């Protein structure tokens, strides 16, 4: 059995009263990652709704399938561990699709810029989580490492496919990155 006090001290040695426990931190990780993969799947669905006949549809479909695999994994963890999903799921359902469709409506390059921006934030997000997890969460850590590699691949594929050629690339990317960070913060807590 895991010594909860030692585990709490290892993951959060400067824990103050009111700070989340390790169990709460791991639940937050799973909750937010579930929400993020759900949102990502919806972004790709929105992009495919607009670009379904475009040559980039095959790449988008490939990325969507990876996100679906990630989402399926987190859905299993939510059930296995009895973790409450974020109450914001209906918001991410709609906003993810709108973000994907709107970026694709601006053209393939804008869709790729959206993907690059989201995946850049998720890369750092997963990296932080991986560094927080210890040997007692090895399975979760390994899944996050695999998923992070996929997200990096999606980001790199988006760049190779013209993300930086999008109209308003800097503004679009900054807006999507800020929105993604806000969605992470909210989904961890709500």
Image: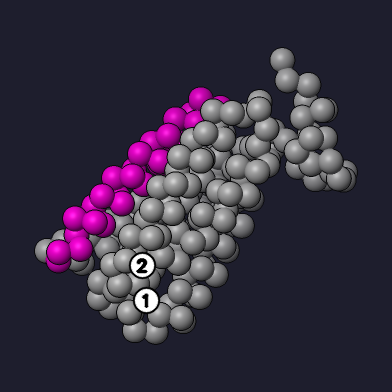
- Calculate the distance from the C-alpha at mark 1 to the C-alpha at mark 2: 6 Å
Instruction: Say the numbered circle drawn on residue 32.
Output: none
Measured along the vertical axis of the image, is residue 45 above or below residue 11?
below
The answer to whether residue 96 of the structure is visible from this angle is no
Q: Quadrant of residue 186?
A: bottom right
Name which residue lies at 75% across and 42% down: 20
Name which residue lies at 65% across and 43% down: 131
Q: Which residues are magenta?
A: 54-81
Instruction: Say the numbered circle drawn on residue 159.
Output: 2
Instruction: Say the numbered circle drawn on residue 164.
Output: 1
Position of the N terminus, as image quadrant, is top right
In the rendered view, does 5 fall on the left or right side of 119?
A: right
Measured along the vertical axis of the image, is residue 186 above or below residue 33?
below
Number of numbered discs: 2
Name which residue lies at 51% across and 68% down: 177
Where is residue 158? Give x, y as percent. 34, 64
């Amino acid at each position: 059995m895991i010594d909860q006090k030692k585990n709490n001290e290892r993951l959060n040695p400067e824990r103050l009263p009111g700070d989340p426990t390790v169990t709460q931190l791991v639940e937050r990780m799973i909750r937010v990652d579930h929400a993020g993969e759900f949102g990502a799947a919806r972004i790709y669905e929105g992009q495919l709704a607009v670009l379904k006949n475009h040559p980039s549809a095959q790449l988008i479909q490939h990325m969507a399938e990876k996100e679906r695999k990630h989402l399926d994994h987190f859905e299993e963890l939510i059930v296995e561990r009895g973790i409450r999903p974020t109450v914001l799921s209906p918001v991410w359902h709609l906003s993810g699709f709108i973000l994907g469709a709107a970026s694709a409506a601006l053209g393939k390059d804008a869709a790729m810029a959206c993907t690059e921006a989201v995946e850049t934030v998720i890369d750092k997000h997963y990296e932080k989580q991986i560094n927080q997890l210890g040997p007692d969460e090895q399975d979760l850590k390994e899944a996050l490492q695999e998923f992070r590699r996929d997200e990096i691949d999606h980001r790199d594929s988006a760049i190779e496919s013209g993300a930086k050629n999008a109209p308003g690339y800097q503004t679009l990317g900054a807006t999507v990155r800020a929105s993604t960070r806000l969605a992470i913060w909210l989904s961890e807590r709500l």
